[in-house]
Amino acid sequence: MGAGQLVCPIFFEKISRLRTSTKKNPIFAPVNTINYLLRYLQFLATAKTKYYIHSPFVFNLINEVIYDKRHYYAFDDIALLREKLLQNKHSITIADYGAGSTRMPKHQRRIAQIATHSSVSDKVGRLLFKLALHQKAQHLLELGTALGISTLYQARAVGANACIHTIEGCPQTAAYAKRNFEVLTATNIQLHVGRFETQLPKVLAQMPTLDMVLFDGNHRKMPTLQYFEQCLPLAHENSVFIFDDIYWSAEMVAAWEQIKQHPKVRLSIDLFRVGLVFFKTDQAKEHFKLYF
């Protein structure tokens, strides 16, 4: 299928999803839906398929991770857990310290709502799984646990001797995540509850290095950049940092652009929903946009 054939189905699928999110749960929608869709059109106009990629490292990553269609048993376990969460009508009080907090600092939300709109999608979750597997990650960090779906995708990809530290600001959400970890007997997860500003320095002090980091808990420019800078000293040649919702708002677009230009970032891959950065010193500084 050519790039042009991909545009219309993907675009209209995104419009449909955004209409649903905005109508039912405005707090979960991008700050400005029209601008978000315009950014997506701009992305489609410049994104490439793997056949235009000449970097051996990126081409290998595309085949083994990004476009890899292999199915792993862990996907079925997590899908079953997600289905149960989607049926859960229990409400909890959300403490939101990110971009949404200016509109709704505390709000009653159903677990089913959070599972639908805040939890990572299957597509992105499988990407996280395959990235962790490909990178042979042992020391992982996640900012923004939510119900723990993204955490589980990563935890199930690595061995029992690996450890993923995940930070969640909302105590009631964290309590549900903890239960989900127990349901899937994920013993290689360390859950930290509290604001990133206080928890992140404590967690980093416990970690010898960072093989993989997922930034998915605050959709504002300055906090995102601050967390990135705090994590940088523990990054190494084979580390990968993943930034979720890089087009969610003008602030996130600005943060992503600044991160790409950082001197330590040698390679970035823009998949629209998420952005990946690598620190491989043997790579010429390059930026890629890929259909995902």
Image: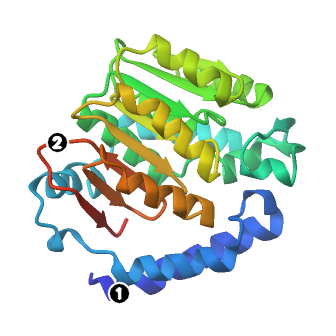
Label 1: few (<14), some (14–19) or many (≥20) C-alpha neighbours in 10 Å: few
- Tell me: 108 left or right of 47: right
Q: In the displayed image of the protein, which residue is found farthest to the front?
A: 263
Left or right of residue 180, residue 207 in this image: left
Q: Which residue is mark 1?
A: 5
* Quarter of the rendering containing residue 192: top right
Question: What is the distance, in whole Å, between disc 1 and disc 2 at their CAs?
Answer: 37 Å
Q: Residue at x 55, y 39 (%)?
A: 226
At x 35%, y 70%, the residue is 291
Q: Which residue is pictured at 49% across the width and 31% down the height?
A: 230
Q: Residue 33, how many percent across, how many down?
A: 68, 74
Residue found at x 27% / y 84%: 2
Q: Earlier in the sequence, mark 1 or mark 2?
A: 1
- The amino acid type, in three-letter code, at marker 1 is Gln
Q: Position of residue 90 (x, y in %)?
A: 85, 37
- Name the element at disc 2: loop
> Does dot 1 land on a helix, a strand or a loop?
helix
Q: Nearer the viewer, residue 236 or 33?
A: 236
Find residue 224 and report its horizontal and vertical position in percent: 56, 45
Q: Is residue 88 above or below residue 50?
A: above
Q: Which mark is residue 281?
A: 2
